[in-house]
Image (cartoon, rainbow, N blue to C red):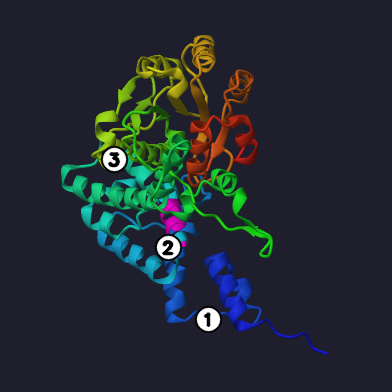
């Protein structure tokens, strides 16, 4: 019995996955002619992922050139349009990131027409942050629009949850007559209504339901976000900056946002009114002096027991490590709720200094990676005085 020939549609899909180099091999299995639309997909992917042989070099060995998009902005704009036509947004983001990293397309992002065609995502914001000092004037407004779109998306996802977490944690002992299912104080309500137990129904029929207050007390807590702006922390800095701006919008918090490399930049003035400007105030790259930034932040600790200190860094310290450990130890001993986030991003476990992380953990300062979605829960746990080391084991521990 002759073997069943391969399905033509499957062959075409494999051809698109493997690229031009697989054309001959797959063609010998029954042909894999691409449709017009599939040819456009192939060209869009090939521009980034295919290696195409070229001439010989001076030693007589074959050279290889990578298929590129060249320096033509119109050609790049067409390519961006093609990938957005044929792929979903999450895939478009991956292809764009590969294009920037593999093909050196950063210079082309300086053209406003090109930048308008790009799918906004946090990786692109990180690239624009790294280029912020070189972006020409004609492109700056377009770059701000791209960053603003990403900031707004992050804010929509996190703002309500963070506000609820903060206000719920700070006002657990105050009750409000305003009805809200999410704000019901079940323990207090049950305790006050035990006498209204209905034996026939087998349950309590409460005469009155008690709710936690959402009244905002001005400056009840100090929250300090201290962000490492080294190049590897790009995504974390974007999320940290947006979360800092959300904290700043809550009157119950006195918020400070600081970025550092070997120097310290206080971004607090911008964090409430201009988070996009705050992000462009970050200069990715350079060395790292964590100790210097922590020393700067110490001046804002007025009431240690009502201070949450979030250190966002991979802990590769270029400054005085021994002094850094002492500072953080003293801060923790005074009652500050101190957390070290090795990453605040959607990605996997970060690269970090495990030795220094162990030293801080021994002081009672948990060190772990956290996705932005878990940040509201983390902040609520810290403000309520929960054991953050236990939270860390349930969060995304760095490995």
The foreground one among 80 and 363 is: 363
Number of other residues with Cα within 10 Å of mark 1, as a class: few under 14, some 14 to 19, many 20 or more: some
Look at mark 3 in the image and give the residue it sits on. 275
**Viewport quadrant of the N terminus:** bottom right
Judging from the image, what secondary structure is the residue with disc 2 in? helix
Q: Earlier in the sequence, mark 2 or mark 3?
A: 2
Q: Is residue 169 above or below residue 183?
A: above
Residue 225 located left or right of residue 144: right
Q: Is residue 68 left or right of residue 23?
A: left
Q: Which residue is mark 1?
A: 33
User: Looking at the magenta stretch, what is its main secondary structure?
Assistant: helix
Quadrant in the picture for the C terminus: top right
Q: Answer whether residue 93 is magenta in the image.
A: yes
Q: Please, what secondary structure does the residue beneath circle 3 have?
A: helix
**Quick one: 41 or 150, which is closer to the camera?**
150
Q: Which residues are magenta?
A: 91-99
Determine the CA span between mark 2 and mark 3: 24 Å
Please identify the residue farthest to the front as the structure is shown: 195
Q: Position of residue 312 (x, y in %)?
A: 46, 30
The answer to whether any part of residue 256 appears in the image is: no
Q: Earlier in the sequence, mark 1 or mark 2?
A: 1
């Amino acid at each position: 019995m002759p073997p069943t020939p391969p399905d033509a549609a499957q062959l075409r899909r494999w051809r698109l996955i493997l690229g031009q180099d697989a054309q001959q091999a797959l063609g010998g299995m029954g042909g894999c002619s691409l449709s017009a639309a599939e040819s456009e997909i192939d060209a869009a992917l090939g521009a980034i992922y295919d290696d195409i042989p070229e001439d010989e070099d001076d030693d007589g060995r074959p050279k290889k050139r990578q298929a590129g998009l060249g320096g033509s902005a119109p050609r790049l704009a067409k390519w961006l349009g093609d990938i957005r036509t044929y792929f979903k947004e999450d895939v478009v983001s991956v292809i764009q990131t590969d294009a920037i990293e593999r093909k050196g397309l950063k210079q082309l992002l300086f053209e406003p027409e090109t930048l308008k065609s790009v799918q906004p995502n946090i990786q692109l914001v990180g690239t624009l942050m790294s280029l912020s000092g070189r972006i020409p004037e004609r492109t700056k407004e377009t770059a701000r629009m791209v960053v603003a779109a990403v900031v707004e998306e992050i804010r929509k996802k996190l703002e309500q949850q963070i506000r609820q977490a903060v206000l719920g944690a700070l006002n657990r002992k105050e009750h409000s007559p305003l009805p809200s299912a999410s704000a019901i104080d079940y323990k207090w309500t049950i305790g006050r209504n035990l006498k209204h137990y209905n034996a026939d129904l087998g349950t309590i029929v409460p005469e009155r339901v008690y709710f936690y207050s959402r009244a905002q007390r001005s400056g009840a807590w100090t929250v300090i976000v201290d962000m490492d702006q080294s190049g590897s922390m790009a995504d974390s800095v974007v999320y940290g900056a947006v979360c800092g701006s959300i904290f700043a919008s809550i009157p119950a918090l006195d918020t400070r946002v600081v970025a550092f490399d070997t120097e310290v930049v206080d971004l607090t003035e911008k964090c409430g009114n201009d988070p996009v400007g705050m992000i462009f105030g970050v200069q990715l790259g350079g060395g790292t002096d964590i100790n210097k930034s922590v020393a700067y932040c110490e001046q804002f600790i007025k009431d240690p027991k009502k201070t949450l200190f979030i250190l966002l860094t991979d802990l590769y310290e270029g400054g005085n490590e021994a002094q850094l450990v002492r500072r953080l130890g003293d801060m923790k001993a005074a009652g500050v709720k101190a957390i070290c986030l090795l990453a605040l991003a959607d990605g996997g476990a970060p690269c970090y200094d495990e030795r220094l992380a162990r030293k801080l953990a021994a002081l009672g300062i948990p060190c772990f990676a956290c996705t932005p979605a878990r940040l509201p829960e983390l902040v609520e746990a810290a403000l309520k005085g929960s054991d953050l080391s236990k939270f860390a084991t349930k969060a995304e521990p760095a490995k």
